[in-house]
Image (tube, rainbow, N blue to C red):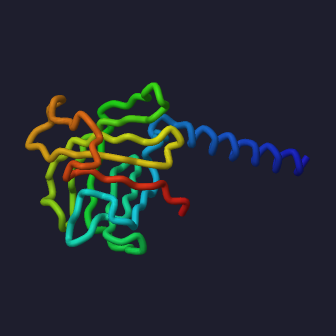
Amino acid sequence: MKARLVLLGAMVVLLSLMLWDCAPGKPKEEIYGTWTNDTSTNTYVIMGGHIQKEVITPDGFKQFLKIADTDRLQEGTAQIESKWIDSDGNIWYKRRITVTAGSLADAGTKCQQLDRLSKSATVWESVFSIVGNWHPESYPTTIDPKTANYRIYYRSQK
């Protein structure tokens, strides 16, 4: 009898964890995770270098100047405006970004960003535009590595 109660309790806990993981308030987007690039292939240059690490969660983002840094350089919120998959299997996002703290931009700075993840979701490229107000036509229209606001990162396994 005691073994059955323990088994039943374990099943309830497991079922609860599965339901929590699938809850509507916990989206699982491919863009969420830790992204790094310690080379100089990013066009977007700040402070004599570029942001080497960005962590994206459902709550927003944190950027770090160096991969090993634990103190964030900048952070903010991000809202997915739209998402689609192209004929090659790449995953695209249009996101609204708002800086909430950091040394690169004033709190409240708004950006509209076009993101492309590779089919395997291991390479993330983006281009952003700083805007005064949100507008559908203010999104960048292409991912061009030659533009000043281009960035490329690789999914971190950490």
Which residue is situated farthest in the front direction here? 146
Q: Residue at x 21, y 57 (%)?
A: 100
Q: Does 60 sit above or below residue 54?
A: above
Which residue is situated farthest in the left direction here? 132
Report whether residue 26 is seen: no
Report whether residue 46 is seen: yes
Judge left or right: residue 104 versus residue 20.
left
Which is nearer the eye, 2 or 61?
A: 61
Which residue is situated farthest in the top direction here? 87
Name the image quarter holding the C terminus: bottom right
Q: Does 94 sit above or below residue 74?
A: above
Which is nearer the eye, 114 or 109?
A: 114
Q: Position of residue 44 (x, y in %)?
A: 24, 58
Q: Residue at x 88, y 51 (%)?
A: 2
Q: Does 40 sit above or below residue 121?
A: below
Q: Residue at x 31, y 64 (%)?
A: 51
Q: Position of residue 32 (x, y in %)?
A: 44, 48
Q: Quadrant of residue 48?
A: bottom left
Q: Does 144 sit above or below residue 152?
A: above
Q: Position of residue 140 (x, y in %)?
A: 21, 37
Q: Quadrant of residue 136?
A: top left
Report the label total: 0
Q: Position of residue 155 (x, y in %)?
A: 48, 54
Which is nearer the eye, 106 or 156?
A: 156
Q: Residue at x 15, y 35 (%)?
A: 138
